[in-house]
Image (cartoon, rainbow, N blue to C red):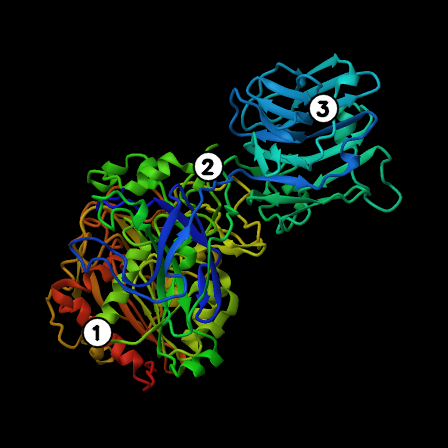
Amino acid sequence: MNDTGIETNAFLGYPDTLSVRAGERIRFHLSSHLPEADARFVRLRCADADATGPGLKYQELVSPLDGVHACQWHEVPCGSSMSVPADSRLAPAGAFSFGCHIWPTRLGAAPQTVLARWNAETGCGYALQVSRHGVTLRVGGAAAPVEVSTGAALDERRWYWIQGGIDPASGELFVHQSRLADAVLPEKRSEMRATHPAADWRLDSQGPFTVAAHHASLAPLRTAAHFDGKIEAPRIAAGLPAPDALRQIDAPARAGQADAQLIACWDFSVGIDTLVVTDRSPHRMHGLLHQLPCRGMTGVHWSGAVHDWRLAPREYGAIHFHSDDIYDCGWPATLVLDVPLDWCSGVHALRLRPAATHRPVDAPARHAETFITFFVTPAAGAHNLRTARPRAPLVLLAPSMTYMAYANSALRLHAVHFEVLTERLLMLTGDDVYLQEHPEIGQSTYDHHIDGSGRAYSSWLRPVLNMRPRATPGNLAIDTHFIDWLEEKGIDYELITDAELDRQGLGAIAGYRVLATLSHPEYYSQAMMNAIMAYQNGGGRHLALGANGFYWRCAWHPQAPAAVEVRRGISGTRTWESRPGEVHLAGTGEPGALWRHSGFAPQKLIGVGFAAMVYDHAGYYLLTPEAANPRVAFALQGIAQGERIGDYGVRAGGAVGIEIDRFDADLGSPPHAVILARSHGLGPGALPTPEEYRTTVHGLDAEQNALVRADMVFFETARGGAVFATGSIAYMLSLSHNGYDNDISRITANVLRRFLDPRPFEAPA
């Protein structure tokens, strides 16, 4: 249960798309131990259930799916692997050998499968496995599997060549491991040979060849014994070549050079930006990656000379597999909705409750309640004409890329000294407990894999617990405070997500007079950054109502479009750091660092950029002397000098908090920008982001460091456009104070009213 006493995880689910146009189709994939669910759709006004704020608010909608639907329980098939379709050449009648390079990251007593054509259900096939005790070759037998092991312990995070060999004619089995020499240790080899009657062997599993796992069953297709670590250059060859010989057998560099022994040679350095693995042998038995392991990873040939895999692909011939990778749960669709044309755009959810026949007699109807969030965007042009709904002049841009980056964050559970850092007692919710008990649903890009490496991918094709009503903490919940304010003030709006912005570019927002970005649009692709800049320079008005926005450079993966890819560069506020040479995104090749390191700091876009985290109490704004500038008089009607602006707010206690941004001309803040207000009242728990200081010194906190502050900024752009930025994530949490009658609400209304006015802004000469 969560902190309201309502069971929020009796049903789990996810949509097949995070956003859908009115008039188009969306599917919901559900799982539950309860046999039935009572389904209803809602349009959310406020998703924050905090009793000190507006509270949870939504409008029930009418749909053809209203009512009771059957549910089934489905497992989450986590763990990445590669598969090659079944082929007789992968189980040769004669002698053959297979091997690869490995860099293991989580060795235990249980075996992990590296290369296999093995079916655990039937006990047929062959597999090359590793554990902390060494490398084992397993072969299917008539009564039980036959095994031979090196018996030599493996070290984590060191490169090895491992190899197995099978000769049905002689009954010989051969297994080998070589720890490759490095700057610290010399090469070390170990191998074992054994002979068993080949008549008892069962080498054909009837299934695919796999890398980083084997098949637990073929019908249904399930994998098991997943490997944690890097794998490079897996290959199969005829005969029993010596380890050095098999390592040197390669695909032909040019026509006429193919080695007759070569059966398959999978080159992970080819097609790094895809999910297809190329077999460079003449047989062309290409493989397919499952559950999105990390490509573009440094391999045995990495020299350190380059850090971009596009410049030296051969040095990036490794793939990092994880036993807890998850991209797509692959559950069957339970409900299919054709979104009614008369649904307004906005934040929507599928609400699920137990069917009345399955509730305890004395249980209230809301004892268990689950929401699955999705976004409805405006209908296509022709559909809008049919519904006679004019386009609203204001569009909200939901930061779906950021929602995904934070999806199922477990930082509160795993971050070191979390309570000391935040100076408050950690209160666990039911969702926190569920994440601990069910790590298979995957965590956020702030968390670590089970082997300690950072999570580079996050997808919506799995249950996301913190992107729904009642989630605490949650970016979506904060963002809906602005929607609640708009509804309270009767201001018409439409909503799209940054997924549309990424796919359509400027076209997604060009028709709107005002664009509002919300509390924390932190993760942005190049297409999204360029689209907003073009919008502003084309006369658009941008209301930037948050902080720490436009910060990390990342991308939706081109071949896995439900996943955002994040690499943590050499600076920035981060909970893990990419290994040397692994900062560039596998999907696009871009550097996965801060936008300021690509010369496009957020200050260039909205005038302010990330300055500090606020771990203790929030602050407030005071007007600056620049507030007397007549260019900003429209924003400050009803606001007096000396007035504490936003000295209140839901949870944070003030409008300046959580994370804050400041003006910085060196990073691109426009010289003609006006700083209307500046933060005050921040304390020792307000600390600068790492890129804001170059060495550790005394006096970094807000009480002693003038650079730890939030700036409220306005400036005009080309062709009559303008930008207003608040510089604080907590800003929105103050809008509802005192029945929506307060100075933060007043400033927001003043700015929005003028931004909606078609009269052009004029920049000073």
Q: Secondary structure at mark 3?
A: strand
Amino acid type at circle 3 is Gly
Q: Quadrant of the C terminus?
A: bottom left
Q: Residue 358's x, y, as percent?
A: 32, 45
Label 2 – label 3 distance at C-alpha:
29 Å
Q: Quadrant of the N terminus?
A: top left
Specify the quadrant of the image occupied by residue 645: bottom left
Residue under pointer 3: 164
Q: Is residue 288 above or below residue 160?
A: below
- Residues 179 and 687: in front is 179
Residue under pointer 2: 449
User: Extreme right residue here?
Assistant: 256
Q: Is residue 587 above or below residue 322?
A: below
- Could you tell me which residue is drawn at 66 percent across and 46 percent down? 313
- Residues 326 and 451: in front is 326
For the question of whether residue 529 can be seen, the reply is no
- Residues 96 and 681: in front is 96
- Residues 659 and 281: in front is 281
Mark 2 is surrounded, within 10 Å at the Cα level, by few (under 14), some (14 to 19) or many (20 or more) other residues, namely some
Q: Residue 455's x, y, as percent?
A: 46, 42
Amino acid type at circle 1 is Lys
Label 1 – label 2 distance at C-alpha:
45 Å
Q: First in sequence: mark 1 or mark 3?
A: 3
Relative horizontal placement of residue 710, taking residue 444 as reference (left or right): left
Mark 1 against mark 2, which lies toward the viewer? 1
Label 1 – label 3 distance at C-alpha:
71 Å
